[in-house]
Amino acid sequence: MKLSSYKLATAAALLGASLLAHAAPLPAPGDTLPVAPHVKVGKLPNGLTYYIQKNARPEKRLELRLVVKAGSILEDEDQLGLAHFTEHMAFNGSTHFKRHELVSYLQSIGVKFGRDLNAYTSFDQTVYMLPIPTDSKEAVEKGFLVLEDWASGITFNDEDIESERGIVLEELRMGKGANDRMNQVLYPKLFNGSRYAERLPIGKADVLRTFKPDAIRRFYRDWYRPDLMAVMVVGDIDPAEAEKLVKAHFGKLKNPDNARPREYAVIPERKADEGLVITDREAPADVLYIRYPIVPHPEDPTYGGYRRDLVEKLYGAMLGQRIMELTQQADPPFIQGGSGMGKVVRGYRSFTVSALLGKGGHVPAINALIQEDERARQFGFTASELDRAKKTMLRNYERMYAERDKSDSAGFVAEYIRNFLEGEPIPGIQNEYAYAQALVPGITLEEVNAAVRAAIPSDDKKLVILMGSLKDRVAPTGTELLAAVDQAQKQTVAAREDKAYASNLLDQPPAPGRIVAEQENKALGTVELTLSNGVKVVLKPTDFRNDQVLMSAVRFGGQSLFGEEDIFNARYASALAAQMGALNYSPADLQKVLAGKSVGVSVAMADLSDNLTGSAGSADIETLLQLTHVKLTQPRRDEVLFNSFVARQRDLARNAMARPEAEFGDTVRGTLFGGHPRVPRTPRPEDFDKVQLERVQQIYRERFSSAKGLTFYFVGSFDVAKLKPLLATWLASLPAADIPVAYRDTGVRPVRGVVKKEVRRGKESKSNISITFTGDAAFSQAEQLRMQALVEVLNLRLTEVLREQLGLIYGGGASGGVTKLPYPNYSVALALPCGPENVDKVIAAAFAEIRKLQENGPAAADLAKVKQNWLTSHRLALRENGFWMAQLQAAQLNGFPPESILGFTERVAAVTPADVQGAAQRYFDFDNYVQVVLYPEAK
């Protein structure tokens, strides 16, 4: 099939980009890769490193980071957990901000705590994240002042430390459960007895409860020092001004006299094979790991090192594809698996094999994974596999290069963090694209196969781990695990045969339809087309990205059109269609046909609607339309893949209810909706006995063989004039037989009155509170916003009172909304994890805050914070293709004029404290809610 003019134009553009990228001379193999020209990396006399880059996406926004090469690995015995505790204290009082002042100020300029303002602590580093709007010079100045205080001005008042203990202990409590208990046994073995096993960032409860304030001050004094710090400044700022601010705020920092040496923990070499079996009845799945020797692996910053990384990525992709295909058997040896080289911690890596086990247990998984690795080690890969992997890799580089001036600041910052902490090279995408174009074509099959042969261990010392509940099976011993691996390694394997695949989905296009009507909406920048089969298409070309096209389609209908006897067939119909493929191609075959193309389409049947979603690079938009056409018109039948999917889902469901949280969630949903059969619950194995291939395919065809009533949306980097003939060919040619295109209200309604239940499950001393208020509502855009304001103001109060003042919770809060479908209604839910001893206190405190809102309304300052965050987020969203896609589709489903998307700022301005108070009075009815509390089981 001939290339369309659209493809030719895009190909020409990519060729031009390629020539541009090759303009710079390429390094020699031993040369150190350069630093990208768009970032300035400097070092102050005190040793502090800084990275500065001007980047206009998103506009009027600056990403600030303080990165400290200090984490839990550096803690003394009386400091276990205090690296992480220090991170908490950074938000609780400093030289220029009293306790709570920092968060309050940042919220007032639209920075949301948790989503925007945040931090994390790991073994070897602590990273503080602060996005700042650049509308005002004062906000930027204060942003740097915040980083300065984090670096050198945390106050650690005794009273503030005591107040924060409860919050950190609640965070520790939230992490308790089967995984934590198993990890306590696993980590000493996994890390070969190194210090990493003894220094988990969350720390130990007894230390957190009893440490003296001087211990945390000592950690801060020893390790928060400029020679271990980096400041990153990326965004909409003049680089010269940014550098002045860095020097002014951080140049005065001093390193301590007689500074403690910053040493990295060593992971000892494994001396012997070992098998380890760890069981816990609350584990939701059984997992197998085979960890081969952990080896030192410092970053190689040279051009030759970059080439070796490309070789590793190529064989990693091919091996991953082979492992995935093992799950496509009628009786798959495991549910999901992986095999490859991966980072362990800074400076170390290991080849690891893993599998999520099915009903067959560990033996078939070990046999399949070991033998597939051995096949690759002995015989390598095929030329066609490598060709496909190269095409995909080069297409990924093309897309990144095309987006070089539309990349978000946060992405650049993430690269610079890795450069500072681990030495990862940062040559920049323009250089990397040139390297890939020069290197990838010359990588031979022989050297890839030699690399994978060297990477895949044969008889190296290994740790074989089996973890889970091991329900309904006899747990092997460690010796038996090792024997199973040894036996698998002795099996004879044969070379893999690969077949040739077409480079196009279809040899001939269908007879095209026509565009019969066209209407432009200049206010929204959209064009609406009506096709000859009745399908509507809304086009919004944008310049937000250079190589991104998003597609969606929607109409009413969905699972609601099928009776309760068909609910499982309807629920899994679209997923099973995807599992079986299209045309004569399985999903794995489709990946191979589409190698080198950036494209994907999924079809889904929701409760009330039929949906399609897709995305593509601009060069692949015709393939996107072809894939859409064949998924709707030519779904594939494959009994083997059907049985494989059902078997894997049944295996996943075997242990799904082992977690206390699963029973808790089911109880919440079941109680709220009176056990209605249409309300989804955690899947049980027996559910899949009701899923039948013939009926699944019939339901899929009933809904998707006809395009009647569908409205397609395309948002992104495309030319409308060049796209229209492709739409006529691939969408206007879709069949559009008469089918129902309205949803059916199935009568699912929440219960009325006050209903309270308790769930007693789990070994750990932790609880979870779910309280849900529901009812009918008057639906409108204005009412949606009032509800959102109510929820967000309430969350400010819950954080301030339940977390900061009372120390009763770490996370949790309120969520809710007003919806139109299938009937106008509202739901507001409180989710509040806490200690069992504090359940009554938490409920009382939460209800007290709700009543205050009902009686007094919100504080004007709280509502102002919420509205400012909305406006800040909205301004960023307006430059995102995904935002426009979601808003245009939501306008259709809810019956709003699409132009109302442009009225958001005015709707925000109209929300008053009285509106929020009225919403609190309407939506929190203390005579009508469902309360479910999870408690630990009796001992």
Image: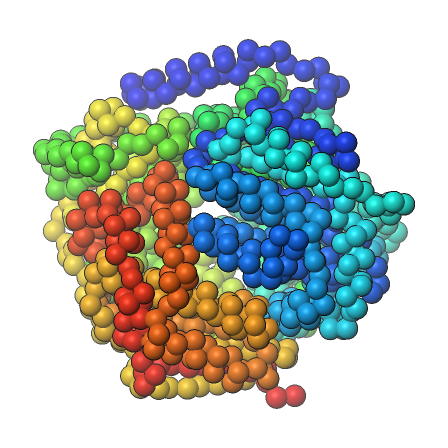
The single residue placed furthest to the left in the displayed view is: 516
Q: Is residue 185 left or right of residue 178?
A: right
Q: Residue 713: x and y, percent?
A: 26, 41
Tell me if I can see residue 293 in this picture. Answer: no
Q: Is residue 690 left or right of residue 21?
A: left
In the displayed structure, 666 sits above or below 363; it is below
Please identify the quadrant where the N terminus is shown: top left
In the displayed structure, 148 sits above or below 476; it is above
Q: Residue at x 41, y 62 (%)?
A: 862
Tell me if I can see residue 209 in this picture. Answer: yes
Q: Residue at x 28, y 53 (%)?
A: 909
Q: Residue at x 34, y 62 (%)?
A: 788
Front-lying residue, 617 or 683:
617
Find residue 313 and report its image quarter: top right
Q: Residue 620: x and y, percent?
A: 37, 29
Q: Residue 890: x and y, percent?
A: 26, 52
Front-lying residue, 800 or 7:
800
Find residue 745 and report its image quarter: bottom left
The single residue placed furthest to the right in the displayed view is: 258
Please identify the quadrant where the C terminus is shown: bottom right
Q: Residue 229: x and y, percent?
A: 72, 41
> Count of labels shown?
0
